[in-house]
Image (cartoon, rainbow, N blue to C red):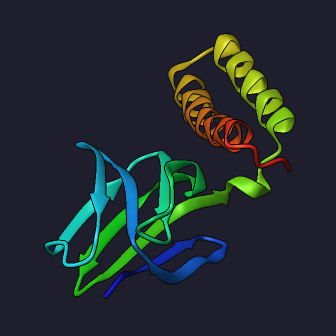
Amino acid sequence: MPIHLQLVSLSGKVFDDDVYEVLLPTLDGQIGVLQDHMPLVSAATNGVISVRRNERDRDDQMEVFATNGGVIEVSNNVLKVIVDEADHADNINEAEAEAAHQRALQLKAEAQDEVSLEKAQQLVDRTAVRLQVAGLKRRHGKRG
């Protein structure tokens, strides 16, 4: 029996299917969730969610999502991940992600106060994850 992944962002359902394994970013580091995982509720951090649909899928066949904050719940072979944002690798253009990251770094460098600096850092973190996912897509030979 596989685990059922429900990945939901503020803009709606992003992924809803049975999978073999999910790797998730948490405050305590990356965790892996397989079938029969113990019940868990945890905060999700900005990072990459990797999904292995079938046991025999290689790492470079995993689906990857850039995510931004949220909550993880595991119970009865259902993994619910509710995040602010979740972008599938196929929907991220690497050149656009790089340009956005450079703009975020520039905003951070130009920040005049603590509030502006914090907002710029959040944008830097978000764009860095999107750039990381775009790079994974390129290295795994998936053009988009």
Figure check: 138 above or below 64: above
Residue 143, percent across and down?
A: 83, 47
Residue 25, percent across and down?
A: 38, 48
Snapshot quadrant of residue 56: bottom left
Residue depicted at x 47% and y 72%: 54
Residue depicted at x 59% and y 56%: 61
Residue 72, percent across and down?
A: 33, 66
Figure check: 101 above or below 37: above
Please give left or right for residue 121 compared with residue 90 in the image.
Answer: left
Figure check: 60 above or below 78: above
Figure check: 120 above or below 51: above
Viewer-closest of 124 and 39: 39
Residue depicted at x 71% and y 26%: 104
Q: Report the number of numbered marks.
A: 0
Snapshot quadrant of residue 63: bottom right
Residue 58, percent across and down?
A: 51, 54
Please give left or right for residue 141 compared with residue 57 in the image.
Answer: right
Which quadrant is the N terminus positioned in? bottom left
Residue depicted at x 78% and y 24%: 103
Direction front: furthest residue: 56
